[in-house]
Amino acid sequence: MACAFTLGGCKKPADSEAQSLVAVEAEKPETGEISERIMADATLSPLAQAAISPKISAPVKTFYVQRGSKVKEGQLLAVLENRDLAAQALDTKGQFASAQATYEMQTKSQVPEDAAKAELDVAQAQAQLKLQQEIVAARKKLFEEGAIPGRDYDTAVAALVQAQAAYDVAANHLNSVKKVNRTASLKSAEGQLSSAEGKYQAASAQVSYSEIHSPISGVVTDRPLFPGETVTAGSPLITVMDTSALIAKVHLAQIVVQRLALGNEAQIMVPGVTDPVPAKVTLISPAVDPGSTTVEVWLRVDNAAGKYKAGTPVRVAIAGRSVPQAVKVPVAAVVTAQDGGKSVMVVKADSTSHKVKVQTGITDGEDIQITQGLNGSETVVTNGAYALEEGTKVKIGKADEGDEKE
């Protein structure tokens, strides 16, 4: 019994040691090429979008499209009630035509006639002045000879003064007609014509506002009203999207964007689509968003077949730079502390765990580059390293279910 007790006591430490072993998965780091995959979330947006709002408030007379209708740039989509606007445009058109006729009359008839009449008045006044000058000269000679009384001479002098005054008035009037009145009349006629033309163009513009045309080619995605309902100026009547290509807009850290270039290949994971959709980087914002301190990057996806829908949330993976000879381990092997420090657990020769601080580089989503801390000869815990304490006895195999949950 004493021997049995002794043998039984000798077995307990071995069983306890076996039970304290923690099963982990471990392997040596690989050395080879790794290509960066930058992962981010995004939402698919249309290549172009136009929420078309009329400039006037009026009932909808006719719609020429429905939701889902394909339209071309410049195509007529709808017409608003415009009979009152058309009548106003017709009225202003008549006023414009009248102003044009008045302008023609003033520039080609009235102004030349006024100038001709003024010139005729000057000629008549000049002739009358010359006649009075001759009469005065003749009567002066007769008066000096005593043939006529002085009263007749004085009468002739007075008539000469009047003739001179009439000539001066006519000459001044002619000068005014040529230099001042003509210019003023032309400007007045031009102003009236321009005013009438402006009113006509404004009325015509109001009529044109009642016709709704598409500014882009695409497909109608929204049409909230029905014929007869009144649309308010500035409120969307029809929305057209160009979905021939879609844009996934992502916001990335500046240090990450510096590794990208236009034309970089990318993949987009669309819900409900089995295979990743190819895409390319088409825009990298030249400025940092001041609010988030990130940079906006656009990925373009071909959608000529209309398979993908705008507004779909997606996951994107952008191909970045590659490192030909990199020490890499699975992403799950790297443990990130609260302070941001990173480490891995390695299995020493005595089957105990040991924490090694590392610095990481790029990742392809499955593996991650180790730039400092490992040389490739270590055995790294790839599954079960989380919450594994320093110096813990481990056995390499499938990680315990409890460890995986932790």
Image: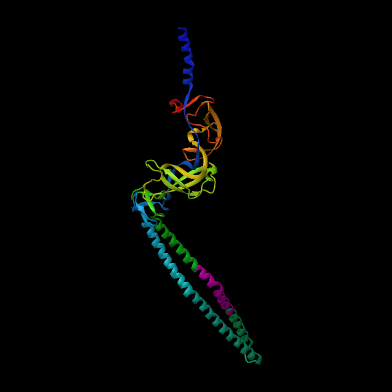
Assess whether residue 178 is covered by the magenta stretch. yes
Q: Which residues are magenta?
A: 167-188
| Residue 16, position as x, y percentages in the image | 48, 18
**Residue 80 visible to an observer of this rendering:** no
Q: Residue furthest top?
A: 1
Q: Quick one: 108 or 324, which is closer to the camera?
A: 324
> In the rendered image of this protein, does residue 238 appear above or below residue 330?
below
Residue situated in front as seen by the camera: 377 or 88: 377
**Residue 264 image offset from top left, x and y in percent:** 48, 48
Q: Is residue 10 visible?
A: yes
Q: Nearer the viewer, residue 151 or 217?
A: 217
Q: Position of residue 86 (x, y in %)?
A: 38, 59
| Residue 63 or residue 227, whichever sits in front | 63
Magenta region, main secondary structure: helix
Does residue 280 appear to the left or right of 221 in the view shown? right
Q: Residue at x 49, y 66 (%)?
A: 191
Q: Is residue 34 above or below residue 356?
A: below
Where, quadrant-wise, is the N terminus in this rendering?
top left
